[in-house]
Amino acid sequence: MFGYRVPAPDEAMLISGGRRGLGGAPFRVVTGHGKFVLPVVRKVRFLTLSMCESEVTETCVTRQGISLHVRAVIAFKVGNDHESIINAGQRFLSDQEQMSVLTGRIFAGHLRAIIGSMTVEEIVTERQKLAAEVLDTSKTEMAKIGLIVDSLQIQSIDDGDTGYIDAMSAPHKAAIQRQAQIAQAQATQASVEAEQAAARNQAEYARQTAIVKAEYSAEVDRAQAQAAQAGPLAQAHAQQEVLAAQTELALRQAKLRQEQLVAEVVKPAEAEAERVRILAAAEAQRMRIQAEAAASYDRVALDRMLIDQLPQIVKEAAGGLAGANVNVLNGADGLGEIAAGLVSQGLTILDSVRQNLGGQDSDGRRPDGQRAEGARSGEDGGSSSLLQLPTGKGRKSDDGPVDVD
């Protein structure tokens, strides 16, 4: 529509002419909407509200007297409120490019002032602090001209040919270089170790592969050898089984033959030997009984013969006393004692003969091969004297028995 004007989103429309604007401003400010403007009566101008940039390159002297070349970039714009737009419009509406020039100059002055109160170390290590202080000190002046600063960035700080910053950074550079060298050495060592480990792994893999191949080859060879030997081995096993069966048969035949020999030879021989032994034992028992009977008969006959000869023995003993000089005491009692003694001696001789005959064999011999004394006497004849008494003189004792010398 003719006469209706609308500002852009990043512009402020300034309408001059007619009644004055709010607060005694020489124009009216319209933002965000359109307005009907009478031609010829009113005049319309537009003020940019977009972001602007200003670059500052300034040589500053620090508190230590060292010159630094500082380069900074300022981002600013016209404020959105009516007061900021009016202030900026009155100053920059006819030449809006002057906003960047004036902003750079303002910040250059504040930058020189702030850097003059700091050391190089603080400036280098605390750039954010430097930017914050410059913003704080310039905020009031920028507000008076209707501008606001969005950011301030310190692009670079250079001491020229002084070499102060390089000297200050030398220890750090050396430390960093040392750390870099150490890191490089460690990386090299790790790389070498990795290569060695890879080489060892490859060698180990090759060794295991060779071992597996050798095992497979050996297994194949064993299988082939077993296959080649299967026929002869089977034949040998069969022959071995045949030999084992033949051996078992031979053992059984030998055992059977042994049993036959035992039944045909050993058992009859043992039976015959047992029969002979029984017959011999019976014959020996019979002969022993006969011998005992003969010996018993001989003893009985001898006893009878001795008994029959006892009177003759006593008689012979008494005959020996006929020529002896005997003194008899006690009269008839003394003679009785002498007679009793003679009889007693005869009985003693009889017992001795019996004992000697008891140890003789059935043929009248003793175990040592000698004949008994009585047997020799019998063989020599019964006419010889069985008892001989020595002759001598008798002496008379007053109080004892009769002594025969």
Image (cartoon, rainbow, N blue to C red):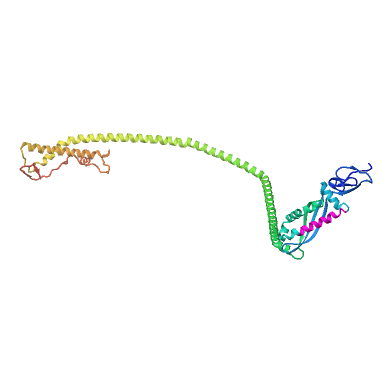
- Between 62 and 136, the residue placed more toward the observer is 136
Residue 224 point in image, percent of width and height? 68, 46
Query: Taking 226 as reference, is 86 left or right?
Result: right
Choose between 116 and 122: the one closer to the eye.
116
Image side of residue 32 versus residue 66, left or right: right
Residue sitting at 56 percent across and 40 percent down?
Answer: 247
Q: Within the magenta stretch, is there residue 44? A: no
Residue range (magenta) = 95-112
* Image position, residue 236 (x, y; %): 63, 43
Q: Quadrant of residue 370?
A: top left
**What is the x, y in percent for residue 388?**
14, 43
Q: Position of residue 108 (x, y in %)?
A: 79, 58
The answer to whether residue 136 of the structure is visible from this angle is: yes
User: Could you say which quadrant of the image residue 200 lies in?
Assistant: bottom right
Quadrant location of residue 299?
A: top left
Left or right of 294, for residue 328? left
Residue sitting at x 56%, y 39%: 248
Magenta span: chief secondary structure: helix
Q: Please, is residue 79 above or below residue 280 in the view?
A: below
Question: Quadrant where the N terminus lies?
Answer: top right
Residue 50 visible in rendering: no
Number of marks = 0
- Residue at image position (81%, 56%) is 104
Magenta span contains residue 98: yes
Quarter that holds the C terminus? top left
